[in-house]
Amino acid sequence: MSTGATASDKAGRTPAPSPLTTDTVRELLSDRKIFPGVPDDLGEDAELVLDSLGLVWLLHTLEERHGLVVEPTDEDIAGLTSLRRLTEFLRAAQADRAEGGPGNER
């Protein structure tokens, strides 16, 4: 009888987390104490400006809730100008980590 475990589960690896979505990232930006100017219905391509405190809090919350450690470069940060771009960046970091790329160590 099969238990439903995959080959990767049997090898001791945990299954990859589900990809981050714009709704997930929008929810991460919902703390009004940290992101007071971000509307609940933030459009995917609406301008998004993250200050340094907001970015640090976002990255902390991302690690706490999703186990994803991300260390963006200054160039990366300059490109995080919308919900869509932020989500794409985080999904790429998540995929890179799942493939064993940089940022895997804690």
Image: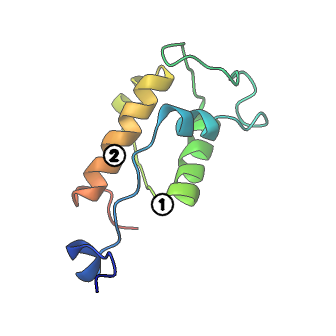
Residue 88 sits in which quadrant?
A: top left
Image quarter of the N terminus: bottom left
Q: Which residue is identified by label 1? A: 67
Instruction: Indicate the amino acid at tag 1.
Output: Gly
Q: Residues within 10 Å of mark 2 (few under 14, many from 20)?
A: many
Q: Residue at x 61, y 40 (%)?
A: 28
Going by the image, does 18 lie left or right of 49?
left
Residue 5 place in picture, x, y as percent: 30, 76
Q: Earlier in the sequence, mark 2 or mark 1?
A: 1
Q: Is residue 76 above or below residue 106?
A: above
Alpha carbon distance from label 2 to label 1: 12 Å
Q: Residues within 10 Å of mark 1 (few under 14, many from 20)?
A: few
Q: Is residue 69 left or right of residue 47?
A: left
Label placed on residue 93: 2
For image coordinates 58% across by 59% down, the residue present is 64
Q: Give the SS element for disc 2.
A: helix
> Relative to residue 59, is residue 41 drawn left or right?
right
Comparing 75 with 31, the one in front is: 31
Q: Identify whether 89 is placed above or below 105.
A: above
Q: Return the x and y of residue 79 as percentages of the image width and height.
A: 39, 23
